[in-house]
Image (spheres, rainbow, N blue to C red):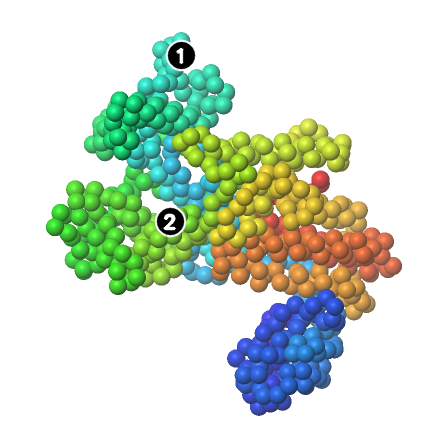
Amino acid sequence: MNLQETLELNVKAAVKSLFEADLQSVEFQATRKEFAGDITVVVFPMLRVVKGNPAIIGEQIGQYLVDNVSLVKAFNVVKGFLNIEIEDAYYLEFFNSINDNSNYGISKVKDDKAVMVEYSSPNTNKPLHLGHVRNVLLGYSVAEILKASGKKVYKTQIINDRGIHICKSMLAWQRFAPNGSDGQKETPLTTLNQDLRKGDKLVGNYYVIFDKKYKEEVKTLISEGQSEEYAKKNAPILLEAQEMLRKWEAGDEEVVALWGTMNGWVYEGFDATYKSIGVDFDKYYYESQTYLLGKEFIAEGLKTDVFEKDEDGSVWCDLTEDGLDRKIVLRADGTAVYMTQDIGTAIQRIKDYPDVGGMVYTVGNEQDYHFKVLFLILKKLGFDWAKNLFHLSYGMVDLPSGKMKSREGTVVDADDLIEEMANTAEEISKELGKLDDYSEDEKKSLYKIIGLGALKYYILKVDPKKRILFDPKESIDFQGNTGPFIQYTYARIQSILRKSSSEDFKASEISLHEKEKQLLKQLEQFPEVIQNAAEQHSPALIANYTYDLVKDFNSFYQNVSILGADSVNEKSFRVALSRKVGETIKNAFNVLGIEVPNRM
């Protein structure tokens, strides 16, 4: 049991003994810095079962704890707040229990049922951009946090590889791609444009070209007297793209071949970006393979009245009694909609991984309603695991310059962003002038670690539900609540360890400095923070915990001599404490997907 759990048992025993009353729970909070104490019991909620003056009740409970609980050293009461001081021996015993555990806070798999986490899930008509980056970082980190909490986890995505969006890029490439000297249209390998050598960027470029030509045609039709509504629906290039989609769905060999080729370019580009960001997947699903999967379950649901068929042949799920609306699941012509696909994909995933007992969908908050409907339909279809589905809903990412738009080419490309972050890290590091003894390769590697760490931390420290205004330069600050500040502290600890030897210490001879005790109190919280972050699907809890731990370490470092301690025993303890803080920073950053450098 941790300190809070131990004290809760003893406070309940005190109330039972002193007042013959039973407490259901005990409310704790951190002791305010102006008062002596390590943890505070809030007395006011007890007044529901114990009548009297809260200050007097607090005095009586405090005295009981001092008399009966060996770890309680002293107490003081401020109005209805019981501030409790804990014996050094408790914290030293705790430290001894974790000192040799380099994976402190990380649980081994303890659950038979696995969790599948879906993230990224891009369209194949453009490269990954800043919005995808938040999705990928959130999904990957939540998967790693769930693992650290003791869950078996599968990472997956569904790639939206069919539809009008990819046909627009395909058509634009057919019509506008330049021919090389061999008469063949440009590819990622043959293009003369260095920026388009990556396949996803080449395909994304033609998506932008399509939109430009489409707007020109709409403008022309309007100038010829057509209404804006008519022009937008009947621009020749759009009608041609729609015809290409019909051919794809009909299995036209030429169209399907081109679709396979261009999607192949995109997949190679995606894989390079994922590798650069440092994320991975256990299984890929493709919309082209799953969009028809839900049909058989729609047929079953019609038999059990989960769905109903309208006169025109379309199939719906009536959710009005559940506070939602009617949702179409099959069009009148029998073709699938997104909901059909998502129903089938969810069921297919359980078939592929029978040990999965729940799923996490990392998708932006514009899809909140969609997932409410999806989860409810799956429950109505009778799937027990449907009660364990979670939509990891997140806010959009904005830039100081405004909202991003893919079709207009105003998005921040993920690859360009990663490069910019590394370049910014290089500029700042050169200003600080601390890398003179590094080789060029070492510098380049460190710049990327710092740049990516800054990007990831800046995004993950914010509650997923909140919208983010992303400022690259602000994120690479070596002071404050930033990734580089935490990475620098980790590197500082490694420097201390390189200058010292690892020796045992005698805990019985240690008298804790208040800064040491504060560090130990922070360390004790780490396993609970991991569990809470897993339960709430929130990397922000771990990011901000790590910042608090680092602030406490730097305060300790500035106020307490480590290598110049008065005795060998004190020095050995402080070095061991520093090592444990470093390990905890590394463990915390690992689940956020952030590297920590040994030197900076």
Q: Which residue is mark 2?
A: 367
Up-down: is 202 above or below 336? above
Closer to the camera in the image, 301 or 42: 42
Give residue 180's mark: 1
Q: Is residue 429 in sight in this rendering?
A: yes
Q: Quadrant of residue 206?
A: top left
Which residue corresponds to the image point at 78% horizontal and 53% vertical from the top-left?
A: 557
Q: Quadrant of the C terminus?
A: top right
Q: Is residue 107 rendered to the left or right of residue 185?
A: right
Q: Say what amino acid the circle numbered 2 marks.
A: Gln
Say which mark, if any, is on residue 110.
none
Residue 271 visible to an observer of this rendering = no
Q: Secondary structure at mark 2?
A: helix
Percent coordinates x, y for residue 174 in the rendering? 32, 20
Q: Is residue 219 above or below residue 67?
A: above
Q: Which of the 4 quarters of the picture holds residue 106?
A: bottom right
Compared with 444, 6 (above or below) is: below
The answer to whether the residues at label 1 and label 2 have Cβ atoms under 8 Å apart is: no
Towards the viewer: 575 or 404 = 404
Instruction: Tell me if 255 is positioned left or right of 417 in this view.
Output: left
Tally of numbered tags: 2
Q: Is residue 254 left or right of residue 530?
A: left
Q: Residue furthest top?
A: 181
> CA–CA distance between discs 1 and 2?
43 Å
Outermost right residue: 566
Image quarter (top left, top right, bottom left or bottom right) of the N terminus: bottom right
Q: Amino acid at mark 1?
A: Gly
Of residues 284 and 85, the one nearer the viewer is 85
Foreground label between 1 and 2: 2
Q: Position of residue 442 (x, y in %)?
A: 67, 32
Residue drawn at the location 62% of the way across and 79% of the way down: 43
